[in-house]
Image (cartoon, rainbow, N blue to C red):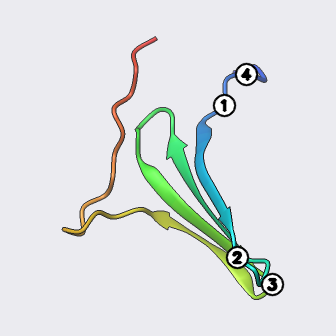
Amino acid sequence: MFIKKDDKRFDEKLIQTSQQGSLISIWVDRQTGVNYIYTWSAQGCTLTPLLDENGKVIVDQIEAN
């Protein structure tokens, strides 16, 4: 199976940088709607599902093609 260039799996929803040069971004899986928070700094990086105030994974509504 080949993936077309415009068939991205993830969309970047938000990106922020700090004065210290670290990066925080939120990515949405286009197939499942799950939101992930990605953080990067000189010390390393992390990727984890984004949770709401009740500890449940944030899931966006997916549009049918």
Q: Position of residue 49 (x, y in %)?
A: 43, 61
**Alpha-carbon span between mark 4 and mark 2:** 30 Å
Question: Is the residue under label 3 in contact with that under label 1 (CB below 8 Å)?
Answer: no
What residue is shown at x 73% (from left), y 77% (from top)?
Answer: 22
Q: Are marks 1 and 4 in contact (CB under 8 Å)?
A: yes
Label 4 close to label 2 by CB (< 8 Å): no
Q: Secondary structure at mark 1?
A: loop
Where residue 55 is drawn, which disc sits there?
none
Q: Which residue is mark 3?
A: 42
- Identity of the amino acid at label 2? Ser
Q: Amino acid at mark 1?
A: Lys
Mark number, residue 8: 1
Compared with residue 7, is residue 57 higher up or lower down, i.e. above or below?
Answer: below
Q: Please say if 64 is above or below 38.
A: above
Label 3 or label 2, whichever lies nearer to me, is 2
Q: Which residue is mark 4?
A: 6
Residue extending farthest to the top is: 65
Q: Amino acid at mark 4?
A: Asp
